[in-house]
Image (spheres, rainbow, N blue to C red):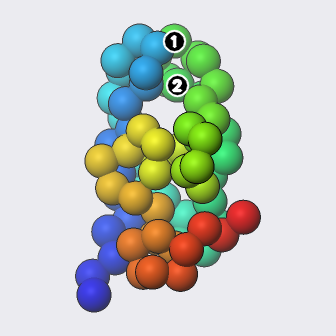
Amino acid sequence: MQIESISELTCPHCGHTSREEMPDDACMFFYECKGCHEVLRPKPGDCCVFCSYGTVACPPIQSGEGCCS
């Protein structure tokens, strides 16, 4: 299985998108939008901002390991 390491995050506040490299072995709980500077946090039930706002789920979820928190 090929794990994707790049995801495009879309800010729910301003709509700004940014291509970001995801950490291989950790979840990202906070991300500051480069457009409006709001701090994004995961939606309830998601392990990280990539799973909530990205085009690709984080590597631990992609690989079937589950949430890394």
Identify the residue at image location x=66%, y=39%.
30
Amino acid found under the numbered disc labelled 1: Cys
Is residue 19 shown to the viewer in this render? Answer: no
Q: Position of residue 61 (x, y in %)?
A: 47, 70
Q: Which mark is residue 36?
A: 1
Task: Tell me: residue 19, above or below residue 12.
Answer: below
Cβ–Cβ under 8 Å for marks 2 and 1? yes
Task: Tell me: residue 49, above or below residue 40.
Answer: below
Horizontal relation, residue 8 to residue 22: left or right = left
Horizontal relation, residue 48 to residue 59: left or right = right
Res 6 → quadrant? bottom left
Q: CA distance from mark 2 to mark 1?
A: 6 Å
Identify the residue at image location x=58%, y=49%.
45
Is residue 38 shown to the viewer in this render? Answer: yes
Identify the residue at image location x=43%, y=21%.
12
Q: Position of residue 53 (x, y in %)?
A: 42, 38
Q: Nearer the viewer, residue 45 or 19?
A: 45
